[in-house]
Amino acid sequence: MLNFTFSNTTKMIFGKGVETQVGKEAAAWGKKVLLHYGGGHIVQSGLKDRVVESLEQAGLEIVEFGGAQPNPRLSLVQEGIALARKEQIDLILAVGGGSAIDSAKAIAIGVPYDGDVWDFYAGKAKAEESVPVGVVLTIPAAGSESSSSSVVTNEDGWQKVGYGALVMRPKFALLNPELTYTLPAYQTACGVADMMAHIMERYFTREADVGFGDHLCEGAMRSILQEAPKAISEPENYGARANIMWAGTIAHNDILGVGRSEDWASHNIEHELSALYDIAHGAGLAIVFPAWMKYVYKQDLDRFVQFAVRVFGVEQDFHNPEHTILEGIRRLEDFFRRIGLPTTLAEAGIAADRLAEMAAKATHGDTITLGNFMPLGQRDVLAIYELCQG
């Protein structure tokens, strides 16, 4: 196990009706709030009215900034930075899922920075300051409500890149599972795939003596496998929705990764898919992650056997470990299909004519490698994209 320092400073407020407390929480960080959200759902559901009422009752001035969208765009972030500076915003409140939160975080670190906010994502600068961010979560998936990272897409070249800094971690997050009752089944499924992937990026490590962390990861994955079908088939099952929402937070709040080297190759490989084709991130991960597994499992047969046996209940074949491993991967793919996700490019309606281009972009022309479990060059990434074809 590696040395580590763990600190998660996000105040989590969980349960029925907690969104009405947003005014009280926001007032602790200033008087003027940039309210950032996406499309019409929060308006149609009445959530926006409840949030605004709570903020106004707390004496806060509100500046609205809508337009958050899946795979958040740099141009919107830059627009938000200009507005936040002009209005001298004290707090940015994201109401929505990972896209709204990631946009809010990018705006927050861009406001006090003299240069272009893309410098952070391009590796040219490190964020030392941030406007405080608060969250009312409506889509459990990205775990961005208590993570220190965000992902933004630069329309110039369609580069989708993640960046993380401790100052980006939200100050508070309000999580009401009831707000997820009206999510479409497909959106719920995409969120489930995203949180599963967040756990697997940490689970597949080459570090020794991380057994306690292994069991935490395995327990979280088993819980998701159990609760996700119920949340999809019974949209107003509060227990299932609550467990899924909390699992999404735990999957990406750093606790499952302490003492471990993490991988993240699959996320970077998927980013090229969603940048070019605008596929939902979770759906892209349901395609990429099994393909990555098929390509790298021989690097550590024992870990993949453990995954198959402990998470998916595969009966271990002691004479043929690869049989056990491939059955575990098959069951993962089957789970994704059962909740309505594609597991191949063809199923997602994506042509296989830009695989080489994506592999080159992901590895910056083969000048970098992806991942830690098995460092992947351009040829490796291309091979994984080819496995994604099914």
Image: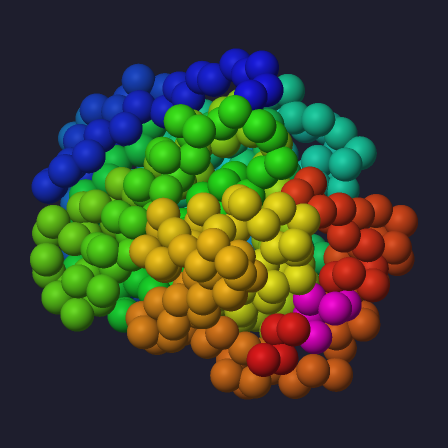
Image location (x, y in percent) of residue 258: 50, 25
Give the prevailing secondary structure in the magenta stretch. helix
Of 320 and 80, the residue lying toward us: 320
Please name the residue shown 69% across and 70% down the image.
385
Please name the residue shown 83% across and 47% down the image.
368
Left or right: residue 159 versus residue 328 is right
From this viewpoint, is residue 75 visible?
A: no
Magenta residue check for 88: no
User: Which portion, as a residue range, is magenta?
Assistant: 382-386
Left or right: residue 33 versus residue 345 is left
Image location (x, y in percent) of residue 323: 51, 65
Magenta residue check for 385: yes
From this viewpoint, is residue 222 visible?
A: yes
Image location (x, y in percent) of residue 102: 50, 44
Image quadrant containing the N terminus: top right
Q: Is residue 248 above or below residue 286?
A: above
**Quadrant housing residue 160:** bottom right
Image location (x, y in percent) of residue 141: 38, 51
